[in-house]
Amino acid sequence: MSDQRPFIPMVSPQVDEPDAIAAQIADVLRSGRLSNGGPLAEGFERAIAAFLGVQEAVAVSNGAVAISLAIEAAAVRRGKAILPAFTFIATLNAAVHAGFEPVFCDIDPETWTLDPGHLRRLLAEHGATLVLPVNVFGVPPDLAAIAREARGAGAAVIYDNAHGMGTETASREAEALLTATTYSLHATKVLVAAEGGVVVSPDREVSAAMRRLRNHGLAQPLSASVPGMNAKLDELRAALALSSLRRLPEALARRRTYLDRLRAALSRHPQLYRTQRIPPGVNPNGQNLGVGLIDAPIDDVIAAFARRGVEARRYFYPPLHALDCSPAGLVLPNTDRLCAGQVCLPLHGRMSEETLERVEAAIHGVAEELEARRLSARSSRPALLGAT
Ligand SMILES: Cc1ncc(COP(=O)(O)O)c(C=O)c1O
């Protein structure tokens, strides 16, 4: 029997002030200033820099182009780029578009983020010029260790923090050692512009270069840096981003409450579920709720959640080294083990009590169903002859 109530999707974009945004967009449309550094995009840049506690931030048209722009602006020497295979394909695309040869790094088995030990070995073996660590579901990698390894090898670090807006970490200083940190404002993210991104660099020259390059490389009418690109955040999306930013502290507080509640439900079934480890000093933003499955057929788990009206979706799947565009045969043990049984469950910017209870009930119900199946499979298995 399937649950007949509305299906609960894994992600559900959250817009808190649709009428206020619509009114502001109507003003933009009447103003005739739709893009190219209008007051809303500039206001958003100032507001997001203040939120992040940085000198300046550069607003761009999406999180993928944010990585490309940072690479170009910092003029990272082309060569090999080391990145995790457990990420969204945008990280790989940015490296390949820029002319890097990708080298896939394994993840830490508990935090699911880039493993600094494997990074060290890959840097020694490949002499890469770029490292692209990635925030996974709101949890940052060990940036201090990664920055140390990369520096020792002379490689630039561009941190793909598409998932990390609002995550608090005790090691923020480590970000000052990086070439740039990029964010996504995609509809599925904590801070939403429908499509949009932000780049922060501790190097003012890199920020200045990003401002030039995002507008086709044009500086003044007769001056240009090529190759430029069109990576501007327009005024319509800036209106959305500004509204989402105003409501971000409340949204983060809600997401953290949901994350804690749902992780607590998962932790009651350690025979089936394992949660992503949150390192000490990290307060994640509740971007996604990742779940690792222990010895359970993943398709059965997805189907059991679906029967209860809850989406369980493989995310960052398949891992990049398993795509048909990657060389065959690469083994990344921690990534492979995780991806054999990993899903994300619903976590939204706003969830009703009823929705939360349905997700909790599904977590418990699926665990009990799977456990009952395991027990019955065990009891119907014939005893091994001669076993001692
Ligand atoms: C890890 C990661 N990097 C980069 C991106 C690209 O961001 P955008 O969709 O804003 O281009 C995403 C997108 O969701 C992502 O998950």
Image (cartoon, rainbow, N blue to C red):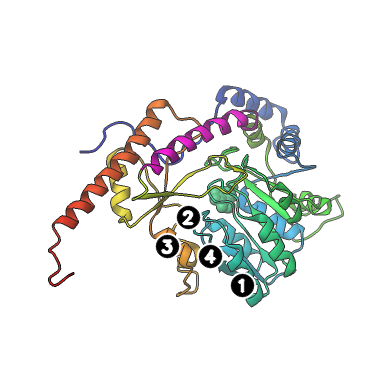
Q: Quadrant of the N terminus?
A: top left
Q: Is residue 104 above or below residue 241?
A: below
User: What kind of element bears circle 3?
Assistant: helix
Q: State yes or no: Cβ of the residue under disc 1 lies below 8 Å from any atom of ligand 1.
A: no
Q: Find residue 106 and name its label.
A: 4
Q: Residues within 10 Å of mark 4 (few under 14, many from 20)?
A: many
| Sooner in the amino-acid sequence: mark 1 or mark 3 | 1
Q: Which residues are magenta?
A: 244-268
- The CA span between labels 4 and 1 is 11 Å
Disc 2: CA contacts within 10 A as few (<14), some (14-19) or many (>=20): some
- Pick whichever of labels 4 and 1 is earlier in the sequence: 4
Q: Nearer the viewer, mark 1 or mark 2?
A: 1
Viewer-nearest residue: 269 or 39 = 269
Q: Which secondary structure lies at badge 2?
A: loop
As measured in the structure, the alpha-carbon distance from the residue carrying label 4 to the one carrying label 3 is 11 Å
Say what amino acid the circle numbered 2 marks: Phe
Q: Is 177 located above or below residue 253 in the figure? A: below
Tell me the residue that label 3 is attached to. 337
Closer-to-camera residue (215/50)? 50
Residue in view at x 55 percent, y 41 percent: 189
Marks 3 and 2, the one that precedes in the sequence: 2
User: Disc 2 beta carbon < 8 A from ligand 1?
Assistant: yes
On the question of residue 240 being in view, the answer is: yes
Residue 279 position within the rendered picture, expressed as x and y whole percent measured from the top left: 57, 49
The crowd level at tag 1 (other Cα within 10 Å; few <14, some 14-19, many 20+) is few
Left of 85 or right of it: where is 311? Answer: left
Task: Specify the quadrant of the image occupied by residue 23.
Answer: top right
- Residue 372, given in percent of the width and then of the height, sits at 22, 47
